[in-house]
Image (cartoon, grey):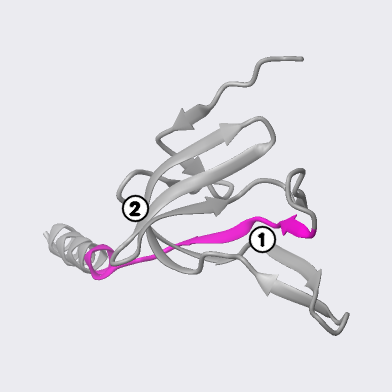
Amino acid sequence: MAKRDLLEFDRYRYGKRSYLYPGDRFRASGGPHFIGTDDNGKRVCIPMNEAGVFVFQRYCEYGASKWIEAYRKGHGIAIIYVGRPRKSPNVDGLRLRPHTIRLVTGRRRKKRAKETREVQKVLFER
């Protein structure tokens, strides 16, 4: 059997041209869920996802498993699954679906863009 090593990266590509770097804020939605039955035999789907705004720390890979380690203020560290959809090899009924990742734009970025436009106006007026 081939030896698998834990690979750690300081950035994660979540789109064609978009990357997350340590300290970037992002929003996660979706994610894994557990399918089982209750006491009456009725099928039950329990979400096991992490949702909300997080701060990126690092991206890790171990074989087919891929995840993001992130921090959420007031809640501590969170593991966010971003690998391919599949059944869990260890837990019956657990379906690993990737989280959807979107960058959170803050006031700083909007303010910087506004300042840049003002500087460009001044430069082009001369």
Residue lying farthest to the top in this orientation: 2
For the point 80% across and 69% down, the residue is 36
Residue at the extreme right of the image, as rendered: 41
Instruction: Say few, some or many: other residues with alpha carbon within 10 Å of mark 2 (under 14 / 14 to 19 / 20 or more).
Output: some
| Quadrant (top left, top right, bottom left, bottom right) of the N terminus | top right
Q: Is residue 64 above or below residue 40?
A: above
Residue 24: which disc? 2
* Whether residue 104 is situated above or below residue 17 in the rendered picture: below
Do the residues bearing badges 1 and 2 touch, measured as CB atoms within 8 Å? no
Image quarter (top left, top right, bottom left or bottom right) of the C terminus: bottom left
Q: Position of 99 compared to 46: left or right? A: left
Q: Is residue 100 magenta?
A: yes
Q: Which mark is residue 32?
A: 1
Tell me residue 28's x, y (percent): 51, 64
Q: Identity of the amino acid at label 1? A: Pro
Q: Residue 88: percent from the left, percent from the top?
A: 75, 49
Tag 2: residue type?
Asp
Q: Nearer the viewer, residue 19 or 100?
A: 100
Residue drawn at (64%, 39%), measured in percent from left and top?
A: 65
Left or right: 32 as drawn, with respect to 44: left
Magenta segment boundaries in residue numbering: 93-110
| Front disc: 1 or 2 | 1
